[in-house]
Amino acid sequence: MKEKLLMGNEAIGLGALRAGVGFVAGYPGTPSTEILETVAKYRDAGTYVEWSVNEKAAMEAAAGAAYAGVRTMVTMKQVGLNVASDPLMSLSYIGIKGGMVVVVADDPGPISSQTEQDTRHFAEFAKLPVFDPSSPEEAYQMIGDAFALSEELQTPVLFRPTTRVCHGCVSLPLEEPEKRPAPEGFVKDTSRWVIFPKLTYQNHQKIEARNASLRKTFSEYRFNRLAGSGQKGIATGGVSYAYTKEALQLLGQEPKLLKVGTPHPFPEQLALRFLDGLDEVLVLEELDPVIERELVYLCGKYRLNVIIKGKLTGDMPNAGELSVEIAKMQLSRFLDLPISDESPKEAAPALPVRPPVLCAGCPHRASFYAVKQAKKGRKAVFSGDIGCYTLGNAAPLDMVDTCLCMGAGVTIAQGLHRVEPDAVNFAFIGDSTFFASGLTGVVNAVYNDADIVLIVLDNSTTAMTGHQPHPGTGKTMMGEITRKVSIPKILEGIGVSFVRRVNPLDLQAAKEAVQQAAAVKGVSAVIFESPCVALIKPAEVHTVENTACVGCKKCIRELGCPALVLENGKAKIEPDMCYGCGLCAQVCPVSAIRKRGDRE
Amino acid sequence: MRNILLAGVGGQGTVLASKLLAQAAMEQGKQARTAETIGMAQRGGCVVSHVRIGDGVCSPLIPHGAADVILGFEPAEAVRCLAYLKPDGVVVAAQKAIKPVTATLSGSAYEGTEMLDYLRRHVRQLIEVDGETICGQCGSAKVLNVALLGAAIGSGALELSLEQMEKTLEQRVPAKFLEMNRQALRLGVQSAQQQSK
Ligand code: SF4
Ligand code: SF4
């Protein structure tokens, strides 16, 4: 077959299809999103795929399908597993029938995440096998192995790529799909599918025995490898293996090397062969010292006199991504090689900092600005949430005082309100986040009679992760038109006494709506409805009438739209960037900004 | 082996350019590997794409000092990534600075000229691309990426022919944008050739 340029996430999606996956569910999250999108794009009629409302729903739906004998996959980013941990922990004891691979993408750095948690640890905690691919090619093969193991052992299996594997592209030959028998269907058996303390106790024993024997089985697994020779050993896994190999090539070294593709259960016999005859080991891995701890444990268990160096000993950085440079530096130290100095001769001029910002024309900018104007003169706290709108924290808007995890803005505002009742507590939440985990928080507020103003930023999409549909959009991931779930009707149904829908780009109306909402006692809500600019064609480009502009810079100072720049003391709009949202025209005190076509 | 680094600002089309490069290399029967910045930085932050062509590549990211070519979509972004460049590597840089909102707000004087000066002093072979003029001629600001690819091809450092890239463009670019992209590619090649004279 012809080689295609595939992203790691595409390789995982296609690998799952090749393995005959019949049911895929997930919730978008960088760096995992494209896996499910790939399945949706290339699936045949026999494969069902959905964006679920959140990761917990996705995993439970997949569990149902797996109980009925289908091969299933669940996709999410690492923090999504926290949401899905409730079903995962119990599923580990109950098991499944058809096969279930839970793909959880970790994000060392982090590049686009709230935490640097390590799913390999989660696997240990949940007592589940985990695969850790070191490249997109390997991911394509390994995902098939994960399905086979899951079905054989009737247990969920974790699959943990990291950002650089997910978002790296390679040229890859594709293989023919496996022929799968039709699923058996759900067979009733309460002694198997209903979790009770006694069953948990029995299965716990079986799981521990299974995991002990997997330590042997995995020692022979094709993606756990041993190479090289010498008294100094290197242990690594995941994408760190790629960095390590390239660094060793650059250094011209071939020390004894252990590559771990299944960090849990750990390939014990293979690791013993690795440790045999070594004086010291350096462990290169991202996130937590998982391999390192296993090796320390083995040295203790078998009384081996080998020094294990890594994060725990301060020989490797314990936060952030690894790179060929870090690997090369630490390997040189460890292998007693000369360290080359690569710093530039002349320091570069001060580089402009470039934090991400809300796009030009983004309706969130207008929403934040309207709230900021409406609360002027009053003490107010702005609890934010996860999505593009987290970027509302940047100057000049400065409208995000807290951001914790999905849906937390709504509930944090309630706690703040109890301690500081004199402040107006605003909670901002996007449409997709509202459905994922904001709803229960609003019920909590109504039930406990909290005094908060809920601001729903409804831009008709899941924007940050690349514009996925959600329950409010009326579309599914299978491309079908479905019923739209209405946010205003939900809020009214819950008992929110004041619910107002308004277009944030109409500044005056938006301000008034917020003022009215803030005057209401109890839970009130303003729903700002305006689509993400990525979904629409630009409206008419705006322009600054140079002679009319008095150079007060109010537009720039207050909005921070990236299309607005200062040129010779006056405001100027970059026509390539302007989306024509018209917000700046409503802010300019001398009406110097207008649509380009309106010029006389 | 060829290592090409594309450095720009989120929204400038670096990802498509890296895909085009990898695709073109594959059409010539070579192995290709790329790594992208996806996520929050795509909203106006610094984005970098790594393209690695040929056998024996392990890391998805280019090591420092190993890039044959840096395509700087913005002068400061090219400077930011200079550590990746080989001592005799080529830099193709768009001249127009993109002012970050923070700089506009603080009224700081970043215009990009100091960055271009630094590049002129420190890069053996620097090709400056007047992206604004080329985009104006082609009628779209979206073709800067292809113009830079053209300039890189014109420098000869990519080991990739103009014909090959034109073929790849035909495959990947929608018909209605094809002509403007072809024009941008050729104008890019021309600007490189003029500078090497
Ligand atoms: S109209 Fe003004 S605020 Fe809106 S995108 Fe254009 S420059 Fe930015
Ligand atoms: S707000 Fe109006 S007058 Fe003031 S700088 Fe902007 S365009 Fe010029």
Image (cartoon, helix red, strand yellow):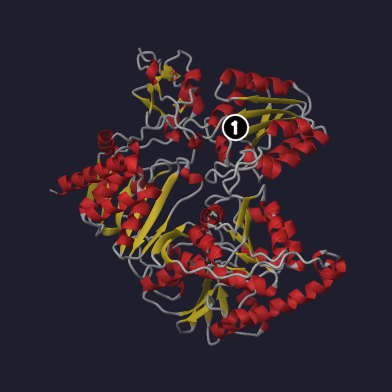
Question: What x and y, as percent, mark residue A519?
Answer: 73, 21
Give the residue number, with chain letter if any, for mark 1: A399
Query: Residue placed at 31% from the left, 49% from the top?
Result: B170
Hey, what amino acid is under mark 1? Met
Q: Is residue A551 above or below residue A185?
A: above
Residue pushed farthest bottom? Answer: A277
Is residue A205 visible in the rendered structure shown here? yes
Asked if residue A77 shows in the view, the reply is no
Residue A78, x across and y down, in percent = 61, 56
- Describe residue A446's horizontal placement relative to residue A368 as left or right: right
Between A494 and A573, the one nearer to me in the picture: A494
x, y percentage for residue B74? 34, 42
Viewer-nearest residue: A453 or A65: A65
Q: Quadrant of residue B177?
A: top left
Taking the image as shown, residue A106 lies to the left or right of residue B102, namely right
Identify which residue is drawn at 24% across, 48% down: B151
Badge 1, how many Cα within 10 Å: few under 14, some, many 20+? many
- Which of B130 and A309 lies nearest the eye of the viewer? B130
